[in-house]
Image (cartoon, helix red, strand yellow):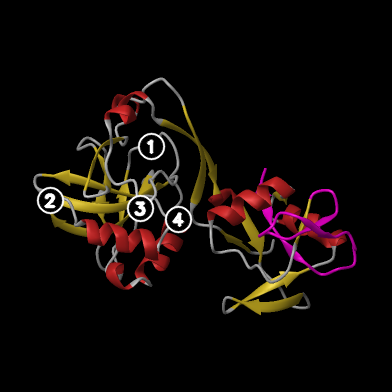
Amino acid sequence: MGRWRGLAVSMVAMWAISAPVRAEQSPCAIVDRQQGWPIIGETCDIGQGLWGNQAPDPKSAAFWVQCGATQGVPSRQFYQSLRQGLPDLPFQVQVREGRGRCLIGPYPNLDVAQLVLRRVRQFGPTKQAVLRQTRQPLSQPAVIRLPPLSQTQSSPEDETSAPMETAITLSHFGLPEPEAGDKQYMEKSMSWLRVPYAQAAPRCQREGMMLASQQELVEVAKATDQLPMRLPYWVQGAKGVDARSGKVVTRNADAALNVLCKKR
């Protein structure tokens, strides 16, 4: 079996509903907003930190990336710098016994959490980020659930008209890694696979996956900056689609293009 590159973050489609969304629906639900930060409840299990070379417990059910720790809620400036530097990650804060912890996640998969951790450590203000592990199962995977920077305070209307989230988990998507003899090209300082359409679906099938649809490609491209964008992508229906515009740009089955796969 070949290798594939997973995507580490998630995106949401949001729409307003009239019924309230109450915190008791999930122990890790957002219960407040302070300094722009979404605040999760003290009963949310954020587990224990993996310090130094400590190995994860094989019984771990979920992982958080801790992006900082302060007395009380971190500053609004820190929040804004993270939203600008790492705009597609789900930040929140838990305050317990006066200690505020900046958290990203949670993620049910260690590999995904480690990918996020590596990315977060590349951003200066969070280069000391660490993983936390918990044995509590997740009610849902990590999603982007933060407001735009201009929306930093909740209003009374928020309590009666809250957004509902439909999560598309990017860890369910991946790009096959190039192997010896494959056509490939460089982008984002990495080598990427290029194949004609006849090889696209079989490469996904080798990973136990299936070729993504045109709509799925568009949604993934909007949710993350990890995708290579120089070439179009083969999607279901023998269509070569530009990930930025979502438009079909070629139907030449011999063209060597990118491939996006989806877990079955």
Question: Quick check: marks 2 and 1 in contact, CB under 8 Å?
Answer: no
| Classed neighbour count for the residue bearing mark 3: other residues with Cα under 10 Å, few (<14), some (14–19), many (≥20) | few
Task: Give how far apart the Cα atoms at labels 1 and 3 are.
Answer: 31 Å
Q: Image quarter for residue 102?
A: bottom left
Name which residue type carries label 4.
Answer: Asp
Between marks 3 and 2 in the image, the one whose residue lies nearer the viewer: 3
Secondary structure, magenta segment, majority class:
loop
* Residue 163 visible in the displayed image: yes
For label 2, count other residues whose C-alpha is less than 10 Å away and answer few (under 14), some (14-19) or many (20+).
some
Q: Determine which of the numbered discs, if any, sits on residue 149 in the image.
A: 3
Q: CA distance from mark 2 to mark 4?
A: 24 Å
Counting residues from the start of the chain, the first of labels 2 and 4 encountered is 2
Q: Nearer the viewer, mark 4 or mark 3?
A: 3
Q: Is residue 208 left or right of residue 84?
A: right
Quadrant of residue 54 in the image?
A: bottom left
**Above or below — where is 250 with respect to 35?**
below
Q: Secondary structure at mark 2?
A: loop
Classify the position of the C terminus by image quarter.
top right
